[in-house]
């Protein structure tokens, strides 16, 4: 092994995927269309809200509110995000365990955008052979026009992709006007151009390299596979027979002829290889680059249909099925993931549905722990935080109970109007009359925070300590 | 390559070479070439780091450092005049933070609030929950910077040294106007030392009387003698503390009938004897140049003083 034979870097080998028709291609196109409609149009949807922005989906960072249709999420509900992420993670385990890399093949943004860019490429430059010819050919007018046209269209899509992303964080119509007038905030321009650049580079130039080299999910999903996991695979027994595959040559035209000579059903046409967006040969077995998009299945099915041979030379199957065993989808592992997934989803939905319209916390101020007044009474101070989560005003009342003889003094703020989505910190002082050496007024006080008008909800009760000097006074 | 050969298969065939090293007999390492874009990104980061050294402050050189070209400018508001002035600094995270603070959406809100507080009367501030919330958060910082060193973080003070600001006993008055005045001009506590004027047993009697004032002991012969000294020409205590011993706020004279002791730590003493001794000791020594609150009018802006007056008032010492 000489040094020369080990170059420091590997030049990327361009892949020219051929287009294909078939059921998986249709499924993929359907998902793609749906995803794009949602992504590009959602920010433009208006949603009437009194006292709050009228955009259906808005992640209002300065205002610290997330608006998702009728759901208004506040910063402190951020643990829901953790819940959503956990659910997605388990969902990924669950789905990968059953059906392998279907996320990669159909839903991943990288795949979706790459697919769109490839469609543009093919629309401008033509089918695979035309593209290869154009690539190898000299720089002439045609090449310049076609390449330039492709890049220009890619650039437009990229820019709109970046801009759309920003629209989720600010008012969309205002943003577009501001962007055009040059008066949008710097962050909006930066994000738009940054995302446009990454979209262009990732979907236009890097493509399958992202899935093979950059994506961490590609690296660890093999740990989620087992012998029952659905994978796209080439049926080697059928394709190769005993003598291997062979082209449709003389005396090798019909299945009978071929089988008689021990030749398999694969006619070595290479269609499955040409359509593969990551540039692998599925007939070499399961490879880590494969994103389970099943385009090779569509390709081979087309060939088989033409020959009027049965479909399924390349197919979704499992390792067990390939070895002639039964595929068991309902395994303890799958059931386990399913149970956790259902539980996590239920908890999240329950938490969202039962969230209180307002929140209140009470904290004892520990410096000083207590204050003794001139007549011997003892006072503790508390900080109360109130938060109106509604987009409507409400009135909140605060009182105390559970401490003998105690009075509450909040300088008249015991009853308070809260603006929509207002949060406020208040000071509360609780005072008890002088206590004798043997009296015990109690060492806890309960604050009751209840909505008086604007909303009907359970009062919040918070028990907090009340400190007295040791042994009374 | 033929049309059928997938590109990645080629890559793989050239990738199965090993580095030629073997560990543990048969453990070998593949020598996979890096993708070219990866390699170039790596070189680019190296170049970028060199540029970075020059643009931003970096290496120490002797007792100075490479200063870099990056600068940050931010607006500074003069505390007294309220005028804004641009300052330019070498790039550093502190200057960056100051710039961000000035540019943050919260800053105009903060300025608005400050203007509101400046314009409002004390009564208006106390009745407005939003303004009070602002006063408590800003006041906490001001108090921590300027007052907490003596009065403690929570304003609880130190008995015998610095007054407790959370109780309702105020030597100079606890109304917001009075607190304001205390802040502006400072205060100086004074009580003559009676050790030279009164005999020890007279001091005992006075201490006994003072204890009865706040209900610590029952009246006795000794306390009656003490009362005579307190109310008469010999002691003359009533000049300042008043005939009813309720004190005189204009003099900063303490109310002796309540249960709060600012200097002689009576509640902390276990026995009546010790309580008496604490009072006696204090009366004998008096106060001179030990109870001084500095004036803040030259150190804090009027707005800050106003904020602090409200803050101190809401600490619990409201009157
Ligand atoms: S081998 Fe087939 S399923 Fe895998 S990426 Fe290529 S076309 Fe898609
Ligand atoms: S498309 Fe089907 S027949 Fe053609 S090479 Fe691939 S596996 Fe063989």
Image (tube, coloured by chain):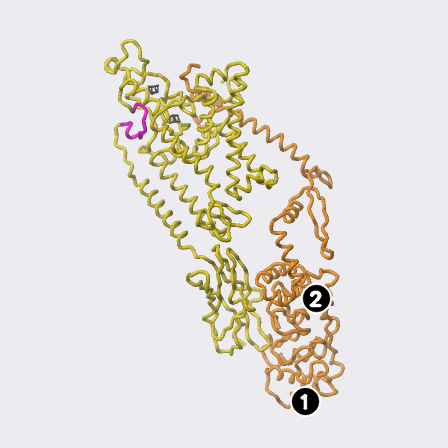
Chain colours: A yellow, B orange
The residue singled out by tag 2 in the image is: B183
Asked whether residue A439 is in view, the answer is yes
Q: Earlier in the sequence, mark 2 or mark 1?
A: 2
The answer to which of B272 and A73 lies nearer the viewer is A73
Residue segment shown in magenta? A312-323
Q: In the shown orientation, is residue A318 left or right of residue A354?
A: left
Which chain's residue wears label 2?
B
Query: CA gap, disc 2 to disc 1?
Result: 40 Å
- Is A128 above or below relative to A412? above
Mark 2 or mark 1: which is in front? 2
Residue B203 in picture, x, y percent from top left: 70, 83
Residue A142 in picture, x, y percent from top left: 52, 16
Is the CB–ligand 1 distance for label 2 below 8 Å?
no
Splitting the image into four quadrants, where does ligand 2 fall?
top left
Residue A406 in magenta?
Answer: no
Asked whether residue B156 is in view, the answer is no
Which chain's residue wears label 1?
B
Residue B225's disc number: 1
């Amino acid at each position: 092994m000489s040094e020369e034979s080990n170059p420091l870097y590997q030049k990327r080998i361009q892949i020219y995927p051929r287009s294909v028709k078939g059921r998986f291609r249709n499924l993929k196109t359907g998902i793609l269309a749906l995803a794009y409609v949602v992504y590009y149009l959602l920010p433009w949807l208006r949603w009437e809200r009194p006292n709050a922005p009228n955009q259906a989906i808005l992640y209002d960072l300065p205002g610290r509110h997330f608006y998702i249709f009728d759901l208004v999420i506040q910063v402190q509900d951020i643990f829901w995000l953790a819940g959503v992420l956990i659910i997605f993670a388990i969902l990924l385990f669950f789905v990968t365990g059953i059906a392998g890399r279907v996320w990669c093949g159909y839903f991943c943004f990288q795949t979706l955008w790459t697919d769109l860019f490839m469609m543009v490429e093919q629309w401008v430059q033509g089918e695979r052979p035309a593209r290869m010819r154009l690539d190898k050919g000299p720089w002439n007018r045609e090449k310049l026009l076609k390449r330039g046209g492709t890049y220009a269209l890619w650039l437009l899509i990229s820019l709109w992709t970046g801009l759309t992303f920003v629209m989720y964080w600010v008012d969309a119509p205002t943003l577009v006007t501001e962007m055009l007038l040059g008066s949008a905030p710097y962050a909006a321009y930066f994000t738009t151009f940054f995302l446009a650049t990454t979209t262009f580079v990732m979907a236009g130039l890097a493509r399958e390299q992202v899935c093979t080299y950059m994506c961490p999910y590609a690296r660890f999903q093999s740990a989620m596979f087992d012998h029952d996991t659905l994978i796209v695979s080439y049926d080697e027994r059928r394709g190769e027979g005993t003598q291997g595959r062979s082209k449709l040559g003389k005396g090798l035209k019909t299945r009978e002829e071929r089988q008689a000579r021990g030749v398999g059903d694969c006619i070595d046409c290479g269609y499955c290889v040409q359509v593969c967006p990551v540039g692998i040969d599925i007939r070499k077995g399961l490879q880590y680059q494969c994103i389970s998009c099943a385009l090779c299945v569509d390709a081979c099915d087309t060939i088989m249909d033409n020959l009027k041979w049965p479909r399924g030379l390349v197919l979704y199957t499992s390792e067990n099925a390939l070895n002639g065993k039964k595929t068991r989808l309902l395994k303890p592992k799958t059931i386990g993931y399913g149970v956790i997934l259902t539980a996590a989803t239920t908890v999240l939905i329950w938490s969202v549905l039962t969230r209180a319209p307002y929140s209140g916390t009470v904290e004892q101020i520990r410096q000083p722990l207590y204050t003794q007044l001139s007549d011997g009474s003892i006072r503790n101070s508390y900080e109360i935080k109130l938060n109106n989560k509604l987009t409507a005003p409400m009135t909140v009342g605060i009182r105390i109970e559970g401490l003998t003889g105690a009075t509450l003094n909040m300088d008249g703020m015991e009853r308070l109007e809260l603006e929509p989505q207002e949060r406020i910190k208040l000071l509360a002082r609780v005072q008890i009359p002088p206590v004798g050496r043997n009296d015990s007024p109690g060492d806890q006080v309960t604050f009751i925070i209840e909505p008086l008008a604007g909303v009907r909800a359970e009062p919040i009760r918070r028990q907090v300590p009340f400190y007295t000097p040791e042994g009374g006074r | 390559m033929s049309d059928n050969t997938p590109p990645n298969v080629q890559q793989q065939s050239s990738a199965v070479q090993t580095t030629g090293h073997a560990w543990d007999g048969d453990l070998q390492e593949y020598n996979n070439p890096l993708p070219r874009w990866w390699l170039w990104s790596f070189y680019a980061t190296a170049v970028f780091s060199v540029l970075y050294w020059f643009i931003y402050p970096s290496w120490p050189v002797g007792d100075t450092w490479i200063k870099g070209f990056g600068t940050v400018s931010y607006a500074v508001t003069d505390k007294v005049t309220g005028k804004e002035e641009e300052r330019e600094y070498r790039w550093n995270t502190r200057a960056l933070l100051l710039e961000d603070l000035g540019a943050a959406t919260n800053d105009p809100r903060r300025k608005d609030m400050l203007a509101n507080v400046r314009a409002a009367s004390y009564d208006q501030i106390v009745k407005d929950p939003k303004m009070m919330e602002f006063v408590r958060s800003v006041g906490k910082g001001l108090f921590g910077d300027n007052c907490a060193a003596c009065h403690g973080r929570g304003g609880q003070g130190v008995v015998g040294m610095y007054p407790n600001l959370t109780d309702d006993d105020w030597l100079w008055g606890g109304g917001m106007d009075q607190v304001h005045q205390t802040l502006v001009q400072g205060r100086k506590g004074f009580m003559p030392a009676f050790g030279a004027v009164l005999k020890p047993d007279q001091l005992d009697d006075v201490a006994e009387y003072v204890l009865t004032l706040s209900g610590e002991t029952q009246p006795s012969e000794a306390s009656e003698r003490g009362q005579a000294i307190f109310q008469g020409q010999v002691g003359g205590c009533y000049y300042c503390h008043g005939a009813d011993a309720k004190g005189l706020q204009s003099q900063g004279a303490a109310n002796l009938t309540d249960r709060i002791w600012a200097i002689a730590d009576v509640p902390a003493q276990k026995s009546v004897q010790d309580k008496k001794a604490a009072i006696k000791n204090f009366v004998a020594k008096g106060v001179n140049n030990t109870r001084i609150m500095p004036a803040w009018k030259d150190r804090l802006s009027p707005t800050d003083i106003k904020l602090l007056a409200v803050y101190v008032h809401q600490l619990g010492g409201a009157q």
